[in-house]
Image (cartoon, rainbow, N blue to C red):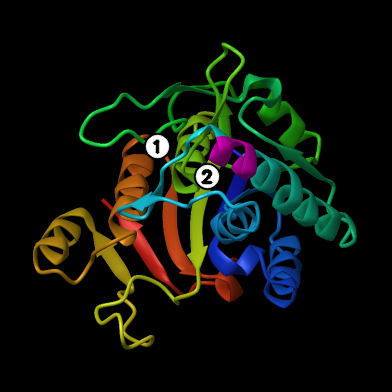
Amino acid sequence: MEKLTIVKVGGKIVEEEQSLRQLLEDFSQIEGFKLLVHGGGRSATRLAERLGIENRMVNGRRITDKETLEVVTMVYGGLVNKNIVAGLQALSVNALGLTGADMNIMRSEKRPVAEIDYGYVGDVKEVDISVLSNLIFQGVVPILAPLTHDREGHILNTNADTIAGEAAKALAKVFNVTLVFCFEKKGVLMDENDDESVIKKLQKPDFARLVDEGVIQGGMIPKLENAFESLEAGVHEVVITNARNISGSDGTLITL
């Protein structure tokens, strides 16, 4: 199988000019087939504030009402996605910006209302990689925005880590997939106040114990849950690192 590197990047890395430029230069140096999944939540928050739309978050997840859905569609599918595409084209990377609705890549269902009504948020149910894998084999580099559709004409806001994980699991049937989650820190930390306390290797039993001990908490928990689910579904390896190390060996290697 050919190797495919899937990089998921979010936070201020893709939203500030200098860090974005560095990220794209590093991403362009990754050899072989590659795919980028991005977030853009801070830009969406700023635009919503400018438009007088209230931002509501629960456990780090955005409540997406109809007005907020319009904002995230504009920001994720438009502004952030096309800035990345343009930046990569300047580096001679033949990038193509896509959402889950394009070519029916990802179909999701609106999250059912339980204790919290998340609004227009989608849980991925189907991934169609037939056209996507053909594009990759032709040398196209897909740039996936965190938006999906329900095949009934509705766009749904979908967590970018989930998009990356679901894409990795589906594409693992065709490629030898390495999934890289990158953010501001060097990896999963033993001490959140010590940037050098990177856990070099994290196995599933260690994960459960570190969550119980409160070492791993917050947004890192769903990120790691996605990582283990991806490995169980056939992804070759998962790495959590910072943007400067997306093609290197530093960071936290996740194993079962």
SS at mark 2 in the image: strand
Query: Crowding at label 1, few (<14), some or many (≥20) Cα neighbours within 10 Å?
Result: some
> Which is more toward the observer, 88 or 68?
68
Residue drawn where x is 58% and y is 49% of the image: 6
- Answer whether residue 242 is magenta in the image: no
> Which is more toward the observer, 247 or 149?
149
Residue 148 tag number = none
Which three-letter amino acid code belongs to the residue tagged 1? Gly
Q: Is 26 rendered above or below residue 151?
A: below
In-image side of 83 versus 158 (left or right): right
Q: Position of residue 2 (x, y in %)?
A: 63, 41
Highlighted range, magenta: 67-72
Q: Position of residue 91 (x, y in %)?
A: 87, 62
Residue 177 tag number = 2
C-alpha span from label 2 to label 1: 8 Å
Residue drawn where x is 85% and y is 47% of the image: 94
Residue 234 tag number = 1
Q: Position of residue 246 (x, y in %)?
A: 58, 66
Q: Is 20 rendered above or below residue 166?
A: below
In this view, the residue farthest toward the top is 152
Q: How many marks?
A: 2
Which three-letter amino acid code belongs to the residue tagged 2? Val
SS at mark 1 in the image: loop
